[in-house]
Image: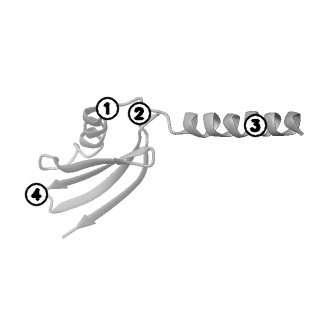
Amino acid sequence: MKKITFISMIVFILFIVIGCENSASPKITEEEAESIVMERHSGGIGEVKIKSVSHSSGEYIVEWEIDADCEFGTDYVNDQSGEIEKAEQTNC
């Protein structure tokens, strides 16, 4: 009985360790995420302004606007690869 309890505890600890590894720390910084978004939208008439940046669930959520083009939106940047996974954009 003690052997089964010991094995169960080892398996439980392994699950906890594996689960914690999945929430790895970001490989890119908040500033790098801002730079990626600014570069993506820099081809237009006006200057890209970053309104806010937050981090949640493995991605940076970057809200931006371009006053001259009357555009604004939100880009979701993967915190490991730096790729834009999703983007929302609106024009006035």
Q: Name the residue under label 4.
A: 67
Residue 22 placement, left or right of 87: right
Q: Which image quarter holds the C terminus?
A: bottom left
Q: Which of marks 2 and 4 is in front?
A: 2
Mark found first going from the N terminus, 4 or 3: 3
Which residue position is annotated with label 2? Answer: 26
Q: State the residue position of label 1.
A: 29
Vertical comparison of 2 with 49: above or below: above
User: Given the image, on which type of amino acid does mark 4 rest?
Assistant: Asp
Question: For the N terminus, which image quadrant?
Answer: top right
Decide if residue 57 is on the left or right side of residue 53: right
The x and y percentages for residue 78 are 43, 42
Question: Residue placed at 14% from the left, 50% from the top?
Answer: 45
The amino acid on which the numbered mark 2 sits, given as a three-letter code, is: Pro
N-term-proximal mark, 1 vs 4: 1
Amino acid of disc 1: Thr
Q: Nearer the viewer, residue 78 or 37?
A: 78
Tell me the CA gap for discs 1 and 4. Answer: 26 Å
Residue at 34% x, 52% y is 75
Mark 2 or mark 3: name the one nearer the start of the chain: 3
Residue type beneath disc 3:
Val
75 displayed left or right of 13? left
